[in-house]
Image: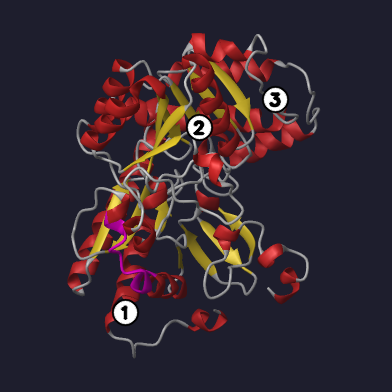
Amino acid sequence: MHRARQSLAGGVSSPFRAKAPVPLYLVDACGSRIQDVDGNEYIDYSLAWGPLILGHRHPSLVETLRAQAERPHIYGAQHELEFQLAETLQRHIACAERLAFTSSGSEAVQIALRLARAFTRRPLIVKFEGHYHGWMDSVLWSYKPDARALASASPAHCIPGSLGQVANAADNLLIAPWNDSDAVGKLFAEHGSEIAAVITEPVACNSGCLLPEPGFLEDLAAMAHRYGALLIFDEVITGFRLSLGGAQAFYGVTPDLATFGKAIAGGLPLSVLAGRREILDMLAGGDVAFGGTFNGNPISLAAAATTIQELSRDSGKPLEDAKGVGESIMRGLGAAAREFGLPLAVIGFGTAFALHFHPRGSLHSYRDTLEDDHEMLDRCLLAALAQGINILPDGRLYVSTVHSARDADETVSAMRRAFRSLVEPTTPHASRAANF
C-alpha cells in the first residue's frame, strides 16, 4: 500500500475500493474464490463490484477472449458482432427497439439524459435520493447525503456529491424520496410541462439494495407518460442479475430508455443504452451528439455474447440457480444474526443484497438507511474477512452463477463465527486477521 501511494492517488484506482483498514491486494481468482498477496483464500462476494456474473475466469469466457485476442482488437468501424449482439439483447430486453454501445454506465446515463431532453424538448430530470447514476457532475447529486445535509435542505434540493461540482450543474434536476409516489406526483404537478424524464434504479442497489414498493414503478411510468415525460431505468446493476430481461421483465414495467452495464459482458468494459426506436434514432441523424473511440469494441462485445449465452442456457437456469444460492445465504444470515441477537436486516434479491444493522427489519428509502449502525457493519466486514468471506465495503454481496450450495453453507457457517465475535469480543479471530 505504501508503494502504491507513491504513484496512485490514494493508492487505489477507484476511491470506492479503499476498504478499511487497508485495501485488499489480490494476486489470483478463480470461480467464486479469490487469493490475496499473503496467500489467504476468500469466498468472493464483491465480484469486481458486480460485473462477474459468471464468476472469475469462467472457462467459456476465457476461451472467447483467447480467440478474440488473436483477431483485431478494435476497428473504429462497423463489424458483425455489433448487430449480432444487438439482436440477442433485443430478444431479452423489452424496451430494446434500438440499442447503442458504449464503455461505462456513467456514459450510458449521459446519453440517456441527453436523448430524453432532446426528444421531449424539456430540461428537467427527476432523480431520487440515494440513487447513483455515475460520477459525472450532472447526476452526482443527493447520492449519499448525511442526515445533517438533508435536514438543512428543502425536499427537492440537490445536495452535491463531491467537492468541485459547480452549483449550476444541478439547475435541471429535481430530487425526490424513493418509493414515495405522492412526492413524485407533487413534482409533476408543479413542473410537469418542464420534466423530460424520471430516472431510477428499479432496485436501489447503490443505497442498500432497497426494493421498490408494490406499484411504485408502475406509478412512475403512469405519471411520466401522463405529463409527456419519459421513464428511464438505470439497470447497470439489475440488468442480467434480477432476470435475463432485467428489472423491467421481472417487474413487468417497460421504460422508454434503459441503461445496462456491469454484468452484461461478464467483467469486460461495456455498457448499453436500450430504448424506443424513435428516441434512439435521434442519434442516427447526428442531431444528438454521441461518440466514443471504444464503442462496440470486438473484445467486449464477444465477451457479452458469451455471457448472455451462458446465462441463457437451459432457459435461464444458471441465473435462476444463482438467485437460489443467494436466497439461501440471505435466509441463513438472517437466522444466524437472530441467534446472536443482532439487529440485522438482509435486503435485496438473490444475486445482489446488502447487510443493514438497523433497528427496524424493513427499509424503504435512502433516509431509512441513515439509521444503519455503520460502525457495527465495519466490524462485521472485518470479522467476515478474517473468516474468509469478502464483502463490499458498503455491506453489499453479489452472487454469481458459480457460487455453489457448498459456498452458501461455508458462508453461513463463517458468518456465524463472525457474528459471534461481534457479541463476544474476546473471541480470537482466525490467524489471517493479523494481515489486516
Q: Position of residue 48 (x, y in %)?
A: 55, 52
Front residue of 46/273: it is: 273
What residue type is disc 3 on?
Gly
Compared with 162, 211 (above or below) is above
Separation of disc 2 and disc 3 at Cα? 17 Å
Compared with 267, 396 (above or below) is below
> Which residue corresponds to mark 3?
291
> Which residue corresponds to mark 1?
422
Residue 199 is tagged as none
Proximity of marks 3 and 1: CB atoms separated by less than 8 Å: no
On the rendered structure, is 161 left or right of 195? right
**Residue at (68, 25) in percent of width and height:** 296
- Secondary structure at numbered mark 2: strand
Looking at marks 2 and 3 on the same chain, the residue that comes earlier in the sequence is marked by: 2
> Which residue corresponds to mark 2?
260
Answer few, some or many: residues within 10 Å of disc 1's Cα (few below 14, many 20 plus, some between 14 and 19). Answer: some
Colouring chosen for the image of the structure: secondary structure
Start and end of the magenta stretch?
368-377
What residue type is disc 2 on?
Phe
Indicate whether residue 309 is drawn in magenta: no
Proximity of marks 2 and 3: CB atoms separated by less than 8 Å: no
